[in-house]
Image: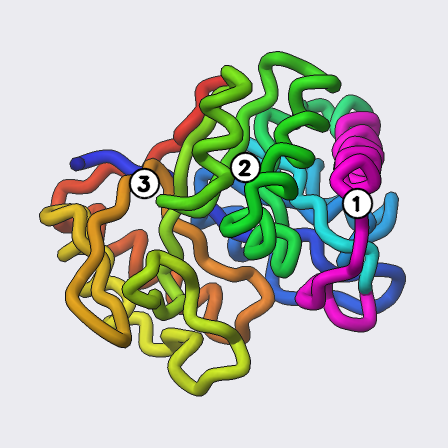
Amino acid sequence: MRSIDLNSDLGEGFGPWSMGDDAAMLGLVSSANIACGGHASDPETMFATLRLAAQNGVIVGAHPGYADREGFGRRIIPMTPAEITRMVAAQIGTLMGLAALAGTKVAYVKAHGALANHAAETPAVAQAIVAALRAISPDLALLAISGTCQEQAARAAYCPVFSEIFADRGYLSTGRLVPRSRPDAMILDAKVATARLLAFIETGLMPAVDGDPIPLDAQSICIHGDSPHAVAMAQEIRARLTAEGVTLAPFLRV
């Protein structure tokens, strides 16, 4: 593997409140997952982020999550699968409309936070998300957490699917992310994160905090844009991977 995408979750402010340095991140990543009104964002924030992405030649995806701004979408909200499908479809549709105004298009969907983690281990939730994509457009791809129910649901529905690993999150031996409630959930040292990624690109194995390294498949690397270390980490990862002959390029061509 000598080519991989670099993505980040962006546009996660709303109103006068900002989250992260979107402008700097959009100069470093090749794909941007843009919040679309559930866990964060509003029409003006979405539009501004979409315009910046277009100006930087960055591929954009919708980043739907539970409608839970207070919890930043990191709490599971009890919903039926049908309700999840409608919620996800509404958020994707909102971003698609604003993307048309901003001169770009939504190419893929990546679930956020608790919704993504719930879908990673619950087939019905994963299928509910995929149902929204398939109803809106057969061209929409799913960016899924590697090795989870998300991938399986997309393939079963003949939905284009790509997989990601996380630069700044710890992994369990099950392939799931270490819960954010634990002190080892986040990787804050950019050099440590980059060394781990280079080893993964060479071997396909991801270190786990509770056991042996696990095999994963990925076409994209995620850096969380809301982290105060996001820009420095993205700069380090981009510089080191490029120096090692790894090409950073979008996983989709649009």
Numbered mark located on residue 80 in the image: 1
Asked if one can make out residue 104 in the rendered structure from this viewpoint, the answer is: yes
Name the residue: 59% across, 25% down.
107
Secondary structure under the numbered disc 1 in the rendered image: loop
Q: Main secondary structure of the magenta part?
A: helix
Secondary structure under the numbered disc 2 in the rendered image: loop
Quarter residue 124 falls in: top right
In this picture, is 33 found above or below 77?
A: above
The residue nearer to you, when weighing 205 against 14, is 205
Amino acid type, mark 1 = Thr
Residue at image mark 3: 218
In-image side of 166 versus 213 (left or right): right
In this picture, is 65 found above or below 253?
A: below
In this picture, is 167 found above or below 88?
A: below
Name the residue: 78% across, 60% down.
77
Answer whether labels 3 and 1 touch (C-beta < 8 Å): no
In magenta segment, residue 97: yes
Distance Cα–Cα, label 3 vs label 1: 30 Å
Q: Which residues are magenta?
A: 69-98
On the image, the x and y values in percent for residue 99 come to 75, 29
Residue at image mark 2: 56
In this picture, is 206 found above or below 137?
A: below
Name the residue: 42% across, 64% down.
177
In-image side of 39 versus 180 (left or right): right
On the image, the x and y values in percent for residue 207 come to 21, 65
Mark 3 surroundings: few (<14), some (14-19) or many (≥20) residues within 10 A:
many
Answer whether labels 3 and 2 touch (C-beta < 8 Å): no
The residue nearer to you, when weighing 157 against 31, is 157
Secondary structure under the numbered disc 3 in the rendered image: loop
Q: Earlier in the sequence, mark 3 or mark 2?
A: 2
Asked if one can make out residue 95 in the rendered structure from this viewpoint, the answer is: no
Q: Earlier in the sequence, mark 2 or mark 1?
A: 2
